[in-house]
Image (cartoon, rainbow, N blue to C red):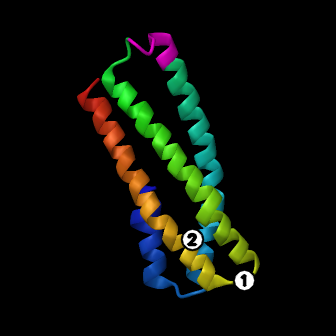
Amino acid sequence: MGFILFAMRPAAFATLQAPARPQLILSSLQRFFPLVWISIAVILISGLILMLQVGFARAPIGWHIMFGIGLVMMAVFAHIFFAPFRRARRAAAAQDWPAVGRSLETMHPLVVLNFTLGWIAIAALLFWH
């Protein structure tokens, strides 16, 4: 998320015009999102295994906070994937680049939200471990 928010997106806006800008961003996300799904599965499964080994009742509060925030982040990503990203792909298939750009723009604040939640989860683990 950091790369997309702080490197690729600003560079695309600084150097590319429509339709190249939404094409680049959408193409990158089409390659990136399968990796996100794999990461979600690995994180969720490993987190559940760890919580079950220790026992939910004995797990530190930071683990519970991180687990809860992680579930929220997964739900936000699922929304991103199944709503604005899906609209962007449909618009790209129709070569409607302004619509692709609008869909990608609706994703931006959600990615910022997930990026922020990720850092809050890390902080919770560090402070309440």
Q: Which residues are magenta?
A: 51-57
- Residue with the most extreme bottom position: 17
Helix or strand or loop: what does disc 2 sit on? helix
Mark 1 lies on residue: 95
97 shown above or below 47: below
Pick whichever, 20 or 100, lies toward us: 100
20 shown above or below 78: below
85 sits to left or right of 73: right
Pick whichever, 68 or 111, lies toward us: 68
Badge 1 density bin: few <14, some 14–19, many ≥20, Cα 10 Å? some
Specify which label sits upstream in the sequence, 1 or 2. 2
Amino acid at pointer 2: Ile
Residue 11 within the magenta-colored segment of the rendering: no
Q: Percent from the top left, x then y, of residue 61?
A: 32, 23
95 shown above or below 47: below
Q: How many marks?
A: 2
Q: Residue at x 41, y 57 (%)?
A: 2
Q: Residue at x 46, y 71 (%)?
A: 9
Helix or strand or loop: what does disc 1 sit on? loop
118 sits to left or right of 48: left
Q: Percent from the top left, x then y, of residue 98?
A: 60, 85
| Quarter-of-image position of residue 19 | bottom right
Q: Residue at x 69, y 69 (%)?
A: 89
68 sits to left or right of 25: left
Mark 2 lies on residue: 25
Query: Of circles 1 and 2, which is in front?
Result: 1
Amino acid at pointer 1: Gln
